[in-house]
Image (tube, rainbow, N blue to C red):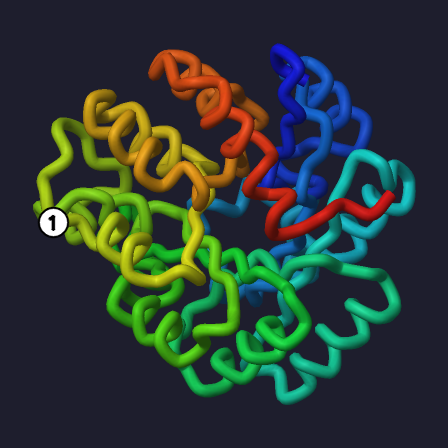
Amino acid sequence: MIDDILVIDSHNHAHYHGNNLQTTLDNMDRYNIDKAWIMPCEIPLNEWCPDNAHEVTGFTKDAKITFENALYYKEHRPERFVLGFCPDPRDPYAIDRLDAAVHTYGIQYCGEWKFRMMFDNWDTIDLYRYCGEHNLPVVLHLEYPLQLKQKYPRPHWWYGGTIESLERALQLCPETTFIGHAPGFWANISGNYDYKTEFYPKGKIAPGGKVPELLRKYPNLYCDISGTSGANAMSRDPEFSVKFIEEFQDKILYGRDLYHHNLQQETLASLNLPKEILRKIYSGNSLKLVTPKD
């Protein structure tokens, strides 16, 4: 705990960036993290950006961030991990697989959704609606097709489509809770179209961002501040961030993703937020959506 606040990392992965169960637990202890959402990423290997190949332990033609690895963490330390699963919606048996994971392994959320398809593709709408019926929040990854250094085998990599396709999904699935994150989501915190050119925009946040608009408009949208993108969004304009967090204190979840760093805790500490708000971000909102089962 941090000053008697329960801390739940609401976005992390098993066997990520060369980590294993013990190094993950050691890192959680180092940063006073009591529990972590441990989620696979069923993205097909031909949809992984080559720049991110190092993110997956043992990256071969057959390796990815698997459900089996996440399940291993959960089975060995059930009191520390909250298990999730998200099948590829393009698999005709996706809902059957998700239903089996609910009833066999007790998964508590659908994550991480990270696919080269639009958020409002009809196959994934069916998956979301199942999640709404079974109280599974869906963790979404939005990334725009920005130009990378490499041009082969694809000139760019994208996931989810656009913030507008996210809004259509929110409208089509009002009973489903969504948790937005990733560079394309957090770049839309600003109204100056940074998302078209930068993964991690810097500088003052302009009025009119789609993220604040959608958080106000849709009660079923939440967000997590994981990864470089979430930490950057909260640190690039501290004055704006304090107001943003105060307004959406009931919809923001603490998470880390990526490397096992401490950027999010350092950023939150720098903003001098009231303890009651920190309590919501660090665990209250997570517990509202998912109650861990030991």
**Residue 33 drawn at (x, y percent):** 67, 24
Q: Crowding at label 1, few (<14), some or many (≥20) Cα neighbours within 10 Å? A: some
Q: Is 244 placed above or below 85 here?
A: above
Quadrant position of the N terminus in the picture: top right
- Residue 118 in sight here: no
Q: Would you say 74 lies left or right of 259 here?
A: right
Q: Is 181 placed above or below 31 here?
A: below
- Residue 61 in sight here: yes
Q: Which residue is mark 1?
A: 208
Amino acid type indicated by mark 1: Gly
Quadrant position of the C terminus in the picture: top right
> Residue at position x 38%, y 74% from top?
169
Q: Secondary structure at mark 1?
A: loop
Quarter of the figure with residue 200: top left
**Residue 29 drawn at (x, y percent):** 73, 17
Q: Would you say 226 lies left or right of 245 here?
A: right
Q: Is 4 placed above or below 226 here?
A: above
> Residue at position x 38%, y 36% from top?
230
Quarter of the figure with residue 8: top right
Quarter of the figure with residue 14: top right
**Residue 30 drawn at (x, y percent):** 68, 13
